[in-house]
Amino acid sequence: MLLTWMSWWQSLSAPEQVFWGIGLIFSLLFIIYLLLQIIGHETDLDLDHGDVDFAFWGLRSLLAFGMFLGYALVVALRMGSGLWVAILAGGLAGGLAAWLSYLVITTLLRLQSSGTLDVYNAIGQKGSVHLRIPANQKGTGKVLVEVQGALRELDAITKGDEIPTGATVTVDQVTPEGVLVVRGIRE
């Protein structure tokens, strides 16, 4: 079998050997990259130092560019195109693959959510007192309030009179320490 591969390789022209080499090397690198991702290595080469989370020329895009460049060059040569037409076709195919890789990854990254609670999203929400809140900021109580789609139990203070357990409150502000400032409301 090795002799079959060797004879096939030797039957190729020099440009075809180079182009097959490019495609095969980038395919091997892509397989290694996938295996590393499967076992938990989270890495990407970021050549852009801007504010973009995923640069166009990230490792995924470079691997896609290299694979499509090499194989498109081979296909163009096999179809009878000249060397320069093949290089142009390979560059276009590689560029398109890199752009599509970038587009897919950035679309997927936009779908992710950190899951971190931003307590400032509680401002303006109504909730109920779970543990009484002492008057005039003399201590903290607990309120149940829906924040970011989930019911949360958070520390709360009030600037007014004591608010008993079970009372309905509205969140007016948040202290720098993340404690809710609430006021009682009548329903």
Image: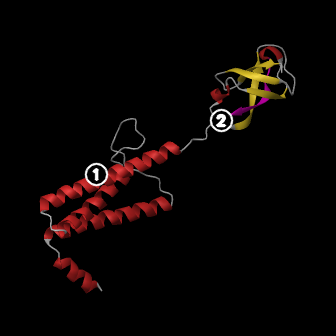
Look at the picture and state if 1 lies above or below 32: below
Q: Where's the C terminus, which quadrant?
A: top right
Q: Position of residue 144 (x, y in %)?
A: 77, 32
Q: Which residues are magenta?
A: 138-147
Q: Is residue 144 left or right of residue 104?
A: right
Q: Which residue is mark 1?
A: 95
Q: Position of residue 111 (x, y in %)?
A: 52, 44
Q: Residues within 10 Å of mark 2 (few under 14, many from 20)?
A: some
State yes or no: discs 1 and 2 in contact (Cβ < 8 Å).
no
Residue beneath the point at 46% across and 46% down: 107
- Number of marks in picture: 2
Q: Is residue 145 left or right of residue 131?
A: left
Q: Is residue 55 left or right of residue 35?
A: left
Observer-nearest of 177 and 92: 92
Q: Is residue 59 visible?
A: no
Amino acid at dot 2:
Gln
Look at the picture and state if 153 lies above or below 20: above
Dot placed on the residue nearer the N-terminal end, 1 or 2: 1
Q: Which residue is mark 2?
A: 148
Look at the picture and state if 79 lies above or below 113: below
Q: Where's the N terminus, which quadrant?
A: bottom left
Q: Residues within 10 Å of mark 1 (few under 14, many from 20)?
A: some
